[in-house]
Amino acid sequence: MGPQPLPWREATDPWPDCYCGQQGCIETLLSGPGLAAEHKARTGRSLSAAQIALAAAQGNSACIATLERWHHRLARALAHVINLLDPDVIVLGGGLSRVASTYEAVPTLWGRWVFSGGLKDPVRTALRPSVHGDASGVRGAAWLWRP
């Protein structure tokens, strides 16, 4: 999603500097390095995003809490996309697209920020992983190259 500020900022959100020169950008907060940096800031433990996801799946409470905060932020960012574009589906790519809990957790959260008519007009946007996993971007780039 790049250098755009995370919508509906909360007091507990970190607001790190972004490479674009601004602060609190979606890219810095929702990337794997962003997830790892926030986990370290809150727990003092240096773990990669993959290690956090694995430990959360195994029941580690600190890692579960880190992923829950990440899911919450992702839900806000994607709600913004839904409000702007009203897509039928959002496909996630990148390394964090492998976090299985995301596909159940995030759609249950984003309704708070999506403009809809509530029960009469529920959010119908689906959230799905990319067919080719976290390598989809590289595969797409390879298709662009013509010998």
Image (cartoon, rainbow, N blue to C red):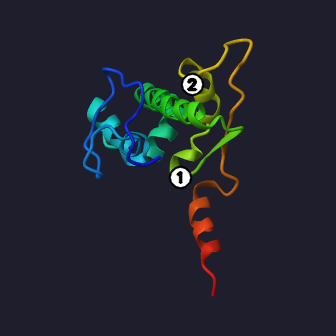
Any part of residue 85 in sight: yes
Give the amino acid at mark 1: Gly
- Neighbour tally class for label 2: few under 14, some 14-19, many 20 plus, Cα within 10 Å: many
Residue at horizontal 35 percent and vertical 21 percent from the top: 10
Q: Which mark is residue 110?
A: 2
Provide residue 22's location: percent of width, then percent of height.
Answer: 27, 44
Instruction: Between residue 54 and residue 107, name the one nearer to us.
Output: 107
Disc 1, SS: loop
Quarter placement of the C terminus = bottom right
Provide residue 49's location: percent of width, then percent of height.
Answer: 44, 45
**68 in relation to 95, above or below:** above
Q: Which mark is residue 80?
A: none
Rendered image quadrant of residue 118 = top right
Q: Which mark is residue 94?
A: 1
Provide residue 17's location: percent of width, then percent of height.
Answer: 25, 43
Disc 2, SS: helix
Q: As drawn, which residue projects farthest toward the bottom?
A: 147
